[in-house]
Amino acid sequence: MKWIYLSPHLDDAALSCGGLIWAQTQRGDHVEIWTICAGDPPTGKLSPFAEELHQRWQSGVEAAARRREEDLNSCQAISATPRHFPLPDCIYRRAGEDYWQAGESRQQNAASSGAFLYPDYQAIFGALHPLESDLVQQLARRLDESLPLEAAVVCPLTVGGHVDHRLTRLAAEQVRRDLWYYADYPYADDLVQQPEQLERLAPANAIRRTFRLNREALQAWGKAVAAHRSQLSTFWPDLKAMQAALRGYYTRMGGAVLWSPPVNSGDKLA
C-alpha cells in the first residue's frame, strides 16, 4: 500500500504515528509525510509570541529551516519520505499575505501584510481566523491536485484544537477522498481514559482500528520524535521522559490506533 500522512507541523506525524509508520515501511508499504505548515516565516518583524517561542527553541528566524532539517532526520528514522509545503506555522501568519507566492513576489507581498492572526496561545487553540477561510480552499485545491488516487490518506482528528490541525483537516475533508484519521499526540494523551471523546472527533461511520507494535517499532518511534530536538522541551524535560511517555501512551491506548473509512483493506495494515 501507499500511505500519505498529513502532518500539520514538522513533528505531528512522528509524534502521533511514528511507530506505526515504521511498521508499515518495514512490511514494504511506501509511506510519505506531507507537512502542511513547513514554510519560512514572512520577511520583517515577528510577533512577540513568535519571538518567545524562538527563545524556547533556542533559534531565531532560521527556526523553520532548522525544523525542516530535523524532519528529514525524523523521516529517515522511520523510512518515510518527507514533503514540505510552503505555508508557514500559524505563529507567523499575517493578514493579507499570499503564502503560495515564491521569492521576490512574496517578499513584496509580505511588506504590506497586516496584523498577526495568531498572536498568543489562546489564539492558536481557538477557531481558525475568519480571514483564513480562503486559505482552506487554496490548500484543498493543492491537495486535490497532488494526492495520488491509489494512496490511503491519513489526517489528524484535531485533538487539542490547534488551528493548524483544524486547517489541515478542513482542507483534507474538502478533497473527495475516503480519509483515515489519527489521534493528535500528545494532546490525545489527556483523552485516553475518555475514549468517547476521541470517537466524537472521528466521522460517524469511521472504524477504530488498533495495531500492535513490536519493540523495534517503539524504539523507532522514539528516535523519530527525538530527531525533532528543538521541540522536545515543549512537552518533556528530557529524552528519557519522552520515551517513557510514548510507551505509556501506547500501553494506555492498547496499541497504535487509526480510524479508517468503513470499507477498505485496513485488516491487512499490520
Image (tube, rainbow, N blue to C red):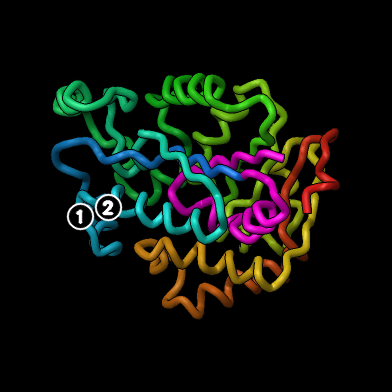
The one nearer the camera, 172 or 266, is 266
In the picture of the structure, the residue carrying the numbered disc 1 is: 60
* 206, above or below 65, in the image: above
Observer able to see residue 185: yes
Q: Residue at x 42, y 53 (%)?
A: 71
Q: Residue furthest bottom?
A: 240
**Disc ID at residue 63:** 2
Q: Residue at x 37, y 51 (%)?
A: 121
Observer able to see residue 187: no
Q: Residue 182: image x %, image y %?
A: 65, 48
Amino acid found under the numbered disc labelled 2: Ala
Residue 17 part of the magenta-drawn span:
yes
Q: Is residue 210 left or right of residue 22?
A: right
Circle 2 crowding by C-alpha within 10 Å: few under 14, some 14–19, many from 20? some
Q: Residue at x 42, y 76 (%)?
A: 237
Circle 1 crowding by C-alpha within 10 Å: few under 14, some 14–19, many from 20? few
Q: Residue at x 64, y 69 (%)?
A: 218
Q: Is residue 90 left or right of residue 1?
A: left
Q: Residue 240: image x %, image y %?
A: 50, 80
The one nearer the camera, 149 or 178, is 149
* Circle 1: element type: loop
Boundaries of the magenta span:
1-30
* Circle 2: element type: helix
Q: Residue 227: image x %, image y %?
A: 43, 63
